Image (cartoon, grey):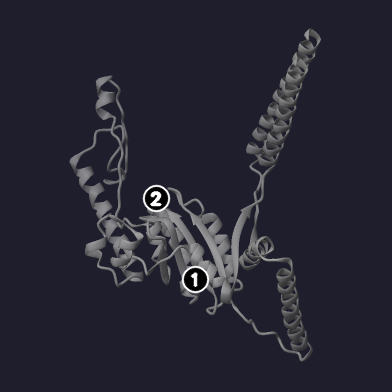
């Protein structure tokens, strides 16, 4: 038993040394990569959702139906595929371009944070879709955002406007929340669909900041700020705020709210802004009553039906993983392997102790 404990202690020491060495290499590499700021180019990935649903259907059929029925279904599918392939081949022989038999639906996703950071990916996805989409197709955006900075969400909404300006139908699906800046984006859609309990609305503007002037004054700390221009700085976190500065700040806040309401009114003129532009939010069913949305439906159900008469493609922009990320994943994988070996040794020790 003593010999085993000695061997196990030696193994554990080697393992810890190896892990520390790997982490040191990863940390050094990360620092080098951060200095060089290597370019991280991305690429577009496209997933055919019809194939995904068809695969699930086959799995259910294999589990539920008897073998003869499954064979018959497979045989019929192959016959249908051959007929379609033959028709396309004959059209090409006649010098014809096979007509698009079904419309296309392009699915995009936007999960917004305070800075609408995903707009960098959204703009790439939109550019890719615009290369092929026509006014016979449709774009579905699955949107989720509680809102954030005005200028950031203004840019995101402007990106969606690229579809509207080219007469490509745009449907916005909200399963959880599209409020404030999120609703600003949703307004661009020709149609807005929401789940029954999705949060919709918040057509309002908010700004808040702490002020530490009295705390600094209590501890005899002076804070000075110099500006050129009367309203270069209205409110500050550390200086003494003036009533004039507060009034100007509120004026700017009200003006932003006016711009927000004008934007919403342009795309959804059916709204009673006096009723809904109060900063309140409504659940999906109530939002429908206020005409903030056009229907109550989940994105899953909408896309499921779309697959019946259209080719549905999910388009996603994926960033190329940098060297630091790849090394980090490698180190995690190695660490997992080491931990597994340690547990294996522990299990063996329990076995031997019996």
Q: Earlier in the sequence, mark 2 or mark 1?
A: 2
Identify the image quadrant of residue 186. Answer: bottom left
Q: Nearer the viewer, residue 286 or 171?
A: 286
The furthest residue to the left: 243
| Cα distance between the residues tagged 2 and 1 | 23 Å
Q: Could you tell me residue 162's position as x and y percent?
A: 49, 69
Question: In the rendered view of the protein, which quadrant contains the C terminus?
Answer: top right
Which residue does the numbered mark 2 point to in the structure image? 148
Image vertical order of residue 132 relative to residue 215, above or below: below
**Crowd class of label 1 (few under 14; some 14 to 19; many from 20; radius 10 Å):** many
Which residue does the numbered mark 1 point to in the structure image? 163
Question: In the rendered view of the protein, which quadrant contains the N terminus?
Answer: top right
Image vertical order of residue 88 relative to residue 327, above or below: below
In-image side of 86 versus 28 (left or right): right
Residue 297 in sight in this render: yes
Instruction: Determine the residue positioned at 74% across, 88% down.
Output: 91
Give the SS element for disc 2: loop
Instruction: Determine the residue positioned at 79% across, 89% down.
Output: 93
Instruction: Determine the residue positioned at 66% across, 85% down.
Output: 99
Q: Nearer the viewer, residue 30 or 67?
A: 67
In-image side of 72 versus 48 (left or right): right
In-image side of 42 versus 168 (left or right): right
Residue 25 in sight in this render: no
Q: Nearer the viewer, residue 245 or 74?
A: 74
Give the SS element for disc 1: helix
Q: Could you tell me residue 29's position as x and y percent?
A: 69, 33
Q: Could you tell me residue 178's position as x and y percent?
A: 40, 57
Q: Could you tell me residue 207's position as x and y percent?
A: 30, 46
């Amino acid at each position: 038993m003593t010999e085993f404990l000695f061997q196990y202690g030696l193994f554990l020491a080697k393992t810890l040394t190896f892990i520390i060495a790997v982490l040191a290499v990863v940390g050094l590499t990360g620092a080098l990569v951060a200095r060089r700021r290597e370019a991280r180019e991305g690429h577009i990935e496209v997933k055919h959702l019809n194939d995904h649903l068809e695969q699930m259907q086959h799995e259910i059929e294999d589990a539920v139906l008897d073998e003869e029925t499954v064979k018959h279904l497979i045989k019929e599918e192959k016959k249908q595929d051959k007929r379609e392939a033959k028709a396309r081949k004959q059209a090409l022989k006649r010098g014809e371009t096979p007509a698009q038999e079904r419309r296309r639906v392009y699915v995009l996703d936007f999960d917004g944070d305070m800075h609408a950071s995903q707009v960098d990916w959204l703009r790439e996805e939109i550019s890719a879709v615009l290369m092929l989409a026509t006014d016979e197709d449709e774009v579905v955006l699955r949107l989720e955002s509680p809102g954030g900075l005005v200028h950031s969400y203004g840019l995101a909404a402007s990106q969606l406007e690229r579809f509207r300006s080219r007469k490509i139908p745009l449907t916005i699906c909200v399963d959880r929340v599209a409020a404030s800046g999120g609703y600003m984006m949703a307004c661009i859609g020709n149609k807005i669909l929401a789940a029954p309990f999705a949060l919709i609305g918040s057509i309002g503007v908010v700004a808040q900041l702490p002020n530490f002037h009295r705390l600094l004054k209590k501890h005899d700390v002076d804070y000075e700020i110099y500006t050129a221009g009367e309203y270069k700085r209205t409110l500050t976190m550390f200086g003494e705020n003036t009533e004039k500065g507060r009034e100007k700040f509120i004026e700017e806040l009200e003006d932003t709210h006016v711009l927000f309401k004008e934007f919403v009114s342009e795309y959804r003129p059916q709204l009673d802004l006096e009723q809904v532009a109060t900063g309140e939010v409504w659940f999906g069913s109530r939002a429908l009553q206020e005409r903030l949305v056009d229907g109550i439906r989940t994105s899953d159900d909408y896309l499921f039906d779309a697959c019946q008469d259209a080719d549905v493609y999910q388009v996603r922009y994926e960033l190329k993983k940098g060297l630091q990320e790849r090394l980090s994943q490698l180190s995690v994988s190695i660490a997992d392997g080491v931990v597994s070996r340690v547990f294996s040794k522990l299990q063996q020790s329990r076995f031997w102790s019996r």
